Image: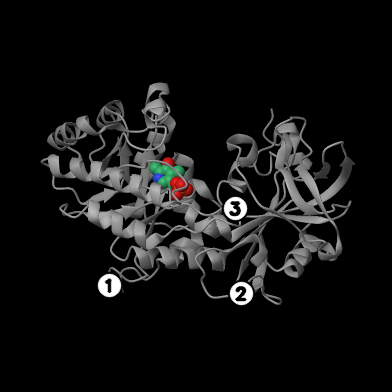
Amino acid sequence: MSRGNSSVASESNPDVRRLADWSAGALRELAAEYGTPLYVQDLDRVRENHERLAAAFPDAGVHYAVKANAGRAVLETLREAGAGAESVPAGTKNAPVGAECASAGEVYRALEAGFAPAGIHYTAVNPPARDLAFVLEEAPEVTVVAGARDTITRLDERGFSGRLALRVHPGVGAGHSEAVATGADAKFGVPVDRAPGLLDAAAARDFDVVGVHAHAGSGMLSDADVATHREVVERVASVARETTVDLEFVDVGGGFGVPYRPDEAPLDLDAVADATRDALASVDAKLVVEPGRYLVADASVLLATVNTVKQTAGATLAGVDAGMTTLLRPALYDARHEVRSLAADANDRPERRASVVGPVCESTDVLAEDRSLPRPERGDLLAVGNAGAYGVEMANQYNSRPRPAVVALADGDHRLVRERDSLSDLTASER
Ligand SMILES: *Cc1c(COP(=O)(O)O)cnc(C)c1O
């Protein structure tokens, strides 16, 4: 792995971009120009991630899962990565990129970013009436992916006769039985054994039944995860075989993982593609994948400034200006993100056990716990790695903290794509 000096990172399209690959100098300059906390988003890297994925799945439809990062710059980058779709043969890296949307708000954003309604999948999880009204009125050409018979009935009641797919919960995966028992899994989709009947019944009404869908979970990385993925695809394939409907596509969801730890190996995409193809062997329908994290996670870092250093008995606490309202994943999922000191003299400092904590009055407001870091000092710039997926997207204003700014890098240039909230933004919608 090499480290770029002038550009933000070097080496052409590696499987993974580590936090160490980002240029400290370039990140320091961006922090100086825009202030912190700041998300730095490399759109060239988003493009690279799409290119690798499309190369591994040359025959698949790629639908970007918008919820990973719904920023306009990201959406436009991915839409453009699939531009020229009409003029090039399917199976090239320019195959169209669609959008997988989890809400009316995401459909609204995808339309604004120029996605064609026909390229949008709307995955309706317990859809609020307001969401259905918007989507069916403004973009009736979308494919609605229903996850309950009730949802199909509601679509029928609204006179929808467009493209319909059915989401199944495949009933495999780590911790699966526990998840079903608590409803954490049953919330998404219908059981595999009920799916063929529901598809047949929907086709007997006026729907244009086009597909079956499963999204089993997130963060597939190991060989064992890939084996589970194969089982999931086999279950979905069995639905496609058993229904009497001629399905246009089988959508196996997203979940392609990225290594959050420096010693973790990247996902073997070709192994995933092979397992998927094998499991679908006898099914005559187009494969659709819905990557979210994979396309955006390593394309972004979060920059934060140390404002308080506290020495405790066991460790050093580095208080920074970003916290759980800026990057929620550590507090919400116990997720691990690498932290790197970008202090100019970081290499000359002794290592310390340190935790990086935010400014929010919650004990869960910890970005990184007990890491080895160059001794933190007030004013240091820290970078938090792999912040591009479910990062700024989950930023919120709890504790009346303004949400951070986002700067995008592309083609050797950079621009602000999202302003930092001002204090007056905090009260702007109050009456
Ligand atoms: C969240 C989600 C995805 C994307 O998941 P990643 O782990 O980010 O790839 C894809 N499809 C559906 C239905 C989802 O809910």
* Relative to 351, 391 lies left or right: left
Up the image or down, 308 lies above or below 46; here it is above
Q: Which of marks 2 and 3 is in front?
A: 3
Q: Which mark is residue 261?
A: 3
Q: Where is residue 29 in the image (x, y as percent from the top left)?
A: 78, 67
Q: Are marks 2 and 1 in contact (CB under 8 Å)?
A: no
Q: Residue at x 58, y 37 (%)?
A: 333
Quadrant where the C terminus sits is top right
Which residue type carries mark 2? Ser
What amino acid type is highlighted by mark number 3? Arg
Marks 2 and 1 sit apart, C-alpha to C-alpha, by 31 Å
Eye-nearest disc, 2 or 1:
2
Q: Is residue 270 above or below residue 196?
A: below
Give the mark nearest the N terminus, 1 or 3. Answer: 1
Residue 278, percent across and down?
23, 55
The kind of secondary structure element at disc 3 is loop
Residue 61 at least partly seen:
no
Say few, some or many: other residues with alpha carbon within 10 Å of mark 1 (under 14 / 14 to 19 / 20 or more). Answer: few
172 vs 13, left or right, is left
Which badge, 2 or 3, is on the more N-terminal residue? 2
- The residue that mark 2 highlights is 10
Q: Is residue 256 left or right of residue 251?
A: right
Residue 89: give its label.
1
SS for dot 1: loop
